[in-house]
Image: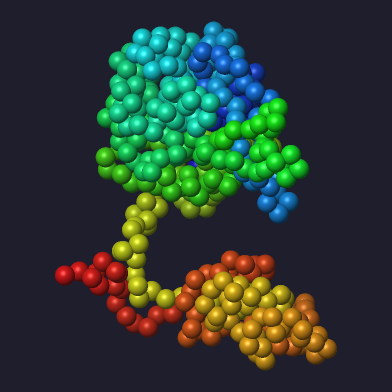
């Protein structure tokens, strides 16, 4: 059986699944219920001088019936007293000594203030500290959060202050709202950070109410930009995790955040170098028990691949990511359509003609719009399985001109039938050649 336990910069937990700093880790009761459900760790909702939050706080982007594909929030750090949070951290660690409890911290940029909150958090029993240099709204207007995380010198300086007194591992939480996240990661490393958390939320306005003309969420007729998270941000998070984990000037462990929705997402983040993964939107949407499926799914996949620990496959995908100039220009794939699975929807035909390279044809029609008026009177039956057949109008099954196909994948991406379109390598015997090799002097 796969061993899911981890050690991130000295912070141990029974599995890599941590609650990210946010509403699901707002209080001790929540964190303990999460641990009972199976979560391996929790990053406490950011602690600092209590603030006053607004109402309302969230808005979302839905996609094809899927709610909260992207979630936007304008909620700030904890509005509960520091002592209350620290007392609950102490109680959680007393009851769950083998689970990771990380205190997320954000205070004003003064050495003595940082020293004080660090000492108090560690005295409460926190296993590690996460410095919130990423909050993109509200706190950044007060000179904290992203206002620190967007300036390498500030990030380095405050990390140095924390490391002067910290006895536990220090993680720096990175903002994605920068040109190159590696610059801040390097600064955190220079400041002595033991690890990184990435990414924090992305600046966003999700939508505007077309009746009131006010962006959402609405606070007494006005709104503000907020932090965007949820499944929609996963591709951005994967990119930034790859950038940080592949940078030789960083070289410290990473806890990945951004769009975690299932165990497959976790495996992808680990393959790009992450040691732990944090989730916030998913438990907000579905509750803490989702982690049961994540634990089972990741463990079963590891067993199927022969991986005993996460370390055995952590970072294995990093060598497969390169700059465009090093990709093989001679490699070629083409689309092939299985007529036995085609339902004649012609989405591939339309997509290819209107959005790609005009290499898919329906015999008898020059363009997609000509096929719309095609009579369905003649029917051809094509087998799906030995026992099943489906009726497709004669002439509605597209074909690919492989000579013109550039292998862009668009038809494969839009096809609604699993396995109907395959992207097949066509080998002409040429030796690999990249742009860098072709232009080398």
Number of numbered discs overlaid on the protein picture: 0
Image position, residue 387 (x, y; %): 77, 78
Residue 295 can be seen, yes or no: no
Image position, residue 249 (x, y; %): 26, 40
Q: Is residue 183 left or right of residue 119?
A: left
Residue 109 figure quarter? top left
Q: Residue at x 65, y 18 (%)?
A: 29
Residue 404 can be seen, yes or no: yes
Q: Is residue 331 left or right of residue 153?
A: right
| Closer-to-camera residue (93/174) | 174
Residue 42 figure quarter? top right
Q: Residue at x 29, y 73 (%)?
A: 433
Image position, residue 183 (x, y; %): 32, 39
Which quadrant would the C terminus be assigned to in this image?
bottom left
Q: Residue at x 65, y 44 (%)?
A: 207
Residue 403 versus residue 122 in the image, above or below: below
| Closer-to-camera residue (250/313) | 250
Residue 374 figure quarter? bottom right
| Closer-to-camera residue (424/233) | 233
Name the image colouring. Answer: rainbow
Image position, residue 368 (x, y; %): 66, 80
Q: Is residue 247 left or right of residue 416?
A: left
Residue 85 versus residue 333 in the image, above or below: above
């Amino acid at each position: 059986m796969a061993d899911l336990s981890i050690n991130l910069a000295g912070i141990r937990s029974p599995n890599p699944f941590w609650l990210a700093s946010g509403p699901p880790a707002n209080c001790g009761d929540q964190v303990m219920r999460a641990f009972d459900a199976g979560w391996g760790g929790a990053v406490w909702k950011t602690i600092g001088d209590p603030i006053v939050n607004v109402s309302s706080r969230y808005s979302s982007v839905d996609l094809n019936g899927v709610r909260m594909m992207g979630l936007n929030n304008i909620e700030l750090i904890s509005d509960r007293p520091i002592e209350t949070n620290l007392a609950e951290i102490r109680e959680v660690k007393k009851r769950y000594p083998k689970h990771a409890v990380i205190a997320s911290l954000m205070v004003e940029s003064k050495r003595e203030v940082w020293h004080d909150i660090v000492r108090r958090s560690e005295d409460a029993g926190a296993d590690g500290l996460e410095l919130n240099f990423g909050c993109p709204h509200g706190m950044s207007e007060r000179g904290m959060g992203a206002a620190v995380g967007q300036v390498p010198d500030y990030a380095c300086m405050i990390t140095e202050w924390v490391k002067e007194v910290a006895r536990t591992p220090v993680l720096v939480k990175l903002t994605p709202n920068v040109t190159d996240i590696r610059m801040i990661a390097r600064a955190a490393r220079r400041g002595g950070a033991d690890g990184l958390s990435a990414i924090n939320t992305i600046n966003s306005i999700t939508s505007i109410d077309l009746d009131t003309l006010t962006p959402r969420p609405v606070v007494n007729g006005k709104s503000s930009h907020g932090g965007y998270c949820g499944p929609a941000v996963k591709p951005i998070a994967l990119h930034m995790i790859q950038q940080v984990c592949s940078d030789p000037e960083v070289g410290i462990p990473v806890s990945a955040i951004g769009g975690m929705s299932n165990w497959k997402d976790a495996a992808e983040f680990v393959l790009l170098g992450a040691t732990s993964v944090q989730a916030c939107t998913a438990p907000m949407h579905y509750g803490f028990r989702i982690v049961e499926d994540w634990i089972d799914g990741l463990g079963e996949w590891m067993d199927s691949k022969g991986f005993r620990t996460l370390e055995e496959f952590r970072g294995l995908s990093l060598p497969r990511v390169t700059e465009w100039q090093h990709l093989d220009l001679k490699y070629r794939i083409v689309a092939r359509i299985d007529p036995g699975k085609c339902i004649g929807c012609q989405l591939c035909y339309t997509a290819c003609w209107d959005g790609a390279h005009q290499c898919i044809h329906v015999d008898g029609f020059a363009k997609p719009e000509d096929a719309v008026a095609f009579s369905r009177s003649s029917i051809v039956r094509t087998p799906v399985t030995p026992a099943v057949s489906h009726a497709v109008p004669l002439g509605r099954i597209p074909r690919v001109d492989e000579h013109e196909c550039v292998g862009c994948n668009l038809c494969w991406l839009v096809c609604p039938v699993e396995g109907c379109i395959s992207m097949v390598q066509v080998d002409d015997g040429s030796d690999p050649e990249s742009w860098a090799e072709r232009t080398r002097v």
